[in-house]
Image: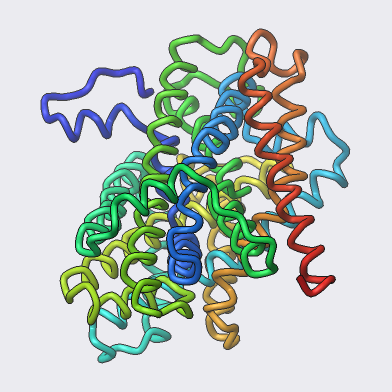
């Protein structure tokens, strides 16, 4: 568990103290998210920087709630939802998650392949790299141990610092950036509202809810603190404090990266009239002549690292959601020969993403559509999770307090209003 003391090496010790929260936060900045933030920055400049500050407490509260539910019950989110709500209602929520995840996995595989092609200066076509990347991820999930997988995930989070570094090549106007960070900018246009929904969807994503909860349960199982079938009773305060610290740092890291991607895209691309950049790969390519080749390389390497971190988490969250809903056993900690069904679902989730890349679906639209789907699916799912957190029969003395309830309710309402407004502007032509 994360309560053990750090080792002698500061960085290694620090990473040992962190767990699902850090990995969940880092995976939030997947290629789909990077593509969305790049598009937002290139199209609206610094206009949506304020969302990084606004979403930080909301996503922290949501992920803390998911972690708290898992730690108290000892089962994943899918199982907890199935126990409290009608099966058909939970099934609809999970189907929405699967639709969003399939788009996400396909778009992220394409983005990693595109980044690899960029680094080869076009010598290797992006489509040639899709299958090798997918095979690498499947081999990692099927044959590596649980401890090895999470160790790799933790080190891959460091790749995201590439986006923080890249921002310093842009030399943005500090006063304008500060004002845009603190003072919200709002436009009542279809493009702007859709951009807000996409940012919210890729920041407060449904797959993160399931991954956070399932990772907490896996850590408990690895420490022998829970029974996968019966769950557990009696959450210790030390466990909750460690999880909260982990979540807080993970979400802060996620929003920091989000902030700097929007900042870099605004300062380099929007400022030079490049407002049509819509993917992370396009953003990386556009950086080369404007911010120098080093920035281009750093951005591309960061994109590959982000994809290799996020894709297994996307497929993993989908697999956990399905198996928890169906009442099946299995986790990343179990061996393939023991739980073949779990790993078959996991592999099929990755294969679905590969197939999407060979169906000639526009990767530019796929990245953005996956974020918008997440933004539409999240509010009803969040509402169910908020009700879970307020149920004393499930949460005992760890029911959501006023602050948690206020923040999670605000996240639900704000995302719902944004999604409804988006549909309204689409139908009215606003």
- In terms of image quadrants, where is residue 245? top left
199 lies left or right of 28: right
The residue shown at (47%, 46%) is: 52
Q: Position of residue 83 (x, y in %)?
A: 79, 30
Q: Position of residue 348 (x, y in %)?
A: 58, 65
- In terms of image quadrants, where is residue 38? bottom left
Residue 217, relative to residue 334: is it above or below?
above
209 lies left or right of 241: right
User: Which residue is more in the foreground, 296 or 153?
Assistant: 296
Task: Indicate the quadrant containing the N terminus: top left, top right, bottom left or bottom right.
Answer: top left
Task: Indicate the quadrant containing the C terminus: top left, top right, bottom left or bottom right.
Answer: bottom right
User: Which residue is more in the foreground, 335 or 181?
Assistant: 181
User: Which residue is more in the foreground, 127 or 184?
Assistant: 184
The residue shown at (43%, 54%) is: 29
Residue 46, relative to residue 368: is it above or below?
above
Residue 23, relative to residue 192: is it above or below?
above
389 lies left or right of 339: right
Figure colour scheme: rainbow
The residue shown at (45%, 52%) is: 49
The residue shown at (67%, 25%) is: 406
Is any atom of residue 343 visible in this view?
A: no
Q: Position of residue 175 (x, y in %)?
A: 32, 50
User: Which residue is more in the foreground, 225 or 415?
Assistant: 415
Single out the residue that lies furthest toward the left: 8
The number of discs equals 0
Is any atom of residue 411 visible in this view?
A: yes
Q: Position of residue 125 (x, y in %)?
A: 35, 89
- In terms of image quadrants, where is residue 126? bottom left
């Amino acid at each position: 568990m994360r309560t053990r003391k750090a080792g002698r090496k500061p960085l290694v010790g620090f990473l040992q103290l962190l767990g699902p929260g850090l990995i969940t936060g880092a995976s939030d900045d997947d290629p789909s998210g990077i593509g969305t933030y790049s598009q937002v920055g290139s199209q609206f400049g610094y206009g949506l920087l304020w969302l990084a500050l606004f979403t930080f407490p909301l996503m922290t509260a949501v992920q803390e709630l998911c972690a708290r539910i898992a730690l108290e019950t000892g089962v994943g989110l899918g199982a907890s939802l199935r126990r409290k709500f009608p099966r058909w209602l939970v099934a609809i929520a999970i189907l929405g998650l699967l639709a969003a995840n399939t788009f996400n996995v396909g778009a992220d595989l394409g983005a990693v392949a595109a980044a690899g092609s960029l680094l080869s200066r076009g010598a290797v076509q992006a489509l040639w790299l899709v299958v090798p990347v997918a095979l690498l991820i499947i081999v990692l999930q099927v044959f590596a141990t649980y401890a090895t997988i999470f160790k790799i995930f933790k080190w891959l989070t460091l790749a995201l610092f590439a986006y923080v570094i890249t921002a310093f090549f842009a030399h943005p106007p500090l006063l304008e950036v500060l004002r845009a960070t603190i003072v919200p900018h709002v436009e009542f246009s279809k493009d702007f509202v859709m951009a807000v929904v996409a940012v919210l969807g890729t920041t407060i994503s449904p797959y993160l809810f399931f991954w956070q909860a399932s990772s907490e349960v896996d850590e408990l199982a690895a420490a022998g603190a829970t029974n996968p079938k019966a769950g557990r009773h009696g959450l210790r305060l030390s466990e909750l404090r460690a999880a909260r610290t982990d979540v807080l740092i993970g979400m802060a890291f996620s929003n920091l990266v989000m902030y700097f991607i929007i900042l870099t895209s605004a300062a380099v691309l929007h400022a030079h009239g490049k407002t049509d950049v819509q993917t992370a790969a396009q953003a990386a390519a556009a950086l080369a002549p404007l911010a120098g080749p080093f920035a281009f390389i750093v951005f591309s390497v960061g994109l590959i690292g982000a994809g290799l971190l996020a894709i297994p988490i996307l497929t993993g969250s989908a697999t956990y959601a399905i198996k928890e809903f169906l009442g099946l056993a299995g986790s990343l900690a179990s061996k393939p020969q023991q739980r073949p069904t779990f790993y078959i679902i996991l592999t099929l989730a990755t294969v679905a993403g590969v197939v999407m890349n060979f169906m000639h679906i526009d990767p530019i639209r796929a990245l953005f559509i996956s974020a918008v789907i997440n933004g539409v699916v999240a509010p009803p799912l969040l509402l169910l999770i908020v009700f879970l957190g307020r149920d004393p029969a499930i949460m005992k003395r760890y029911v959501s307090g006023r602050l948690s309830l206020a923040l999670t309710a605000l996240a639900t309402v704000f995302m719902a209003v944004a999604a409804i407004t988006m549909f309204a502007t689409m139908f009215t032509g606003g």
